Image (spheres, rainbow, N blue to C red):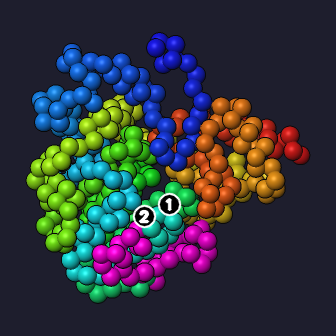
Amino acid sequence: MTQWVTMKRPYNFSAGPAAMPQEVLTQAAGEMLDWHGSGMSVMEMSHRGKEFISIYEQAQADLRELLAVPEQFRILFMQGGGLAENAIVPLNLSRAGTVDFVVTGSWSQKSLQEAARYCAANLAASNEADGHTTLPMPLNWRLSKNASYLHLCSNETIHGVEWHELPDLKAIGYDSPLVVDCSSHIASRPMDWSRIGAAFAGAQKNLGPAGLTLVVVRQDLLDRALPICPSAFNYKTVADNQSMFNTPPTYAIYMAGLVFKWLKSQGGIAAMEQRNQAKAALLYDAIDSSQLYYNKVARDCRSRMNVPFFLRDESLSEAFLSGAREHGLLQLKGHKSVGGMRASIYNAMPIEGVQALVDYMLEFQRSRA
């Protein structure tokens, strides 16, 4: 075990499930058979026992502190991932009938399609015409009157487009809540809760392992569920039962709690944002200054978490990926729907990993000159 936790590991650029901090994995390995003298692994504990309740309450408190979540919001630990939330959100919040959607890539497109099963889904704006490489400006959105809410994905994992600042809906005269799918950049930067009605995120990119879904919802939105909403997915029911209406994903909550403590030890969200800006700048600078690599996304909305890039000579792609693996750089192949390469550089990716990727990219380019 000691050899495993001290060895130099490859750099994992997977888009999700994604790399986790090695310190977290090491602690979890040490606590696997016996959590704090309890004689039990966390995955063996009753979710209503005092041991797990202490884990749950600490994770809740640490996350609220890290994300500066105001008291008028409830933090829910649920299951199903972002795709399930594409149904769960309209089941909870679409009582007014119409929901507006801003489509900026594959994930927000999936959100619109799924919500249309439960409500009238209005496409308020889309960047499909330019290949999902820019962001449509709010003043040009075709918004509905008295909509239940407006949905947007604040970071598109596949296309690499990110809202660096959430839109101020009140400034454009829109009174309905904003719902944000922030799965792929949660905890990478501060969030302006004054502009948000509800936010959700699958944990498997920046918060922990797959299985846990975070929902943060304003208190006044809790009691709007459609009659057909399943009890286990009803936000009010989940909130009233402190996320224990059904058995929650206990081990994933424990792992996320360790990640929250790690984030606090790193200086919190503000410190992580600075690191993420530095990592992204390092990689984008290497791409932009290259004659071999290129990125399609407009510079003012490039993702800091998911960096897609392409080789001008696509016939070299397999050789690039093979060489990357030999250099200990894993999971760089782009999503099958867009091709190319993609480096996901979430919180757990150190700047040394990004530098190792940049060094390899330059070496590969020189070898093909």
Residue occupied by mark 2: 153
Type of the residue with mark 1 = Glu
Pick the front one: 300 or 321: 321
Q: Are marks 2 and 1 in contact (CB under 8 Å)?
A: yes
Within 10 Å of disc 1 (Cα), the crowding (few <14, some 14-19, many 20+) is many
Q: Please state which amino acid type lies under the numbered disc 2.
A: Cys
In this view, the residue farthest toward the right is 369
Quick one: 73 or 269, which is closer to the camera? 73
Res 135 seen here: yes
The image position of residue 220, as x and y in percent, is: 14, 66
Q: Which residue is mark 1?
A: 156
Residue at (75% x, 37% y) in the render: 323
Which corner quadrant of the image does residue 249 belong to?
Answer: top left
Give the side of residue 1 with respect to residue 190, left or right: right
Where is residue 310? Give x, y as percent. Answer: 71, 56
Residue 307 vertical position relative to residue 58 in the rendered view, above or below = below
**Which residue is pictured at 55% across the width and 18% down the height?**
7
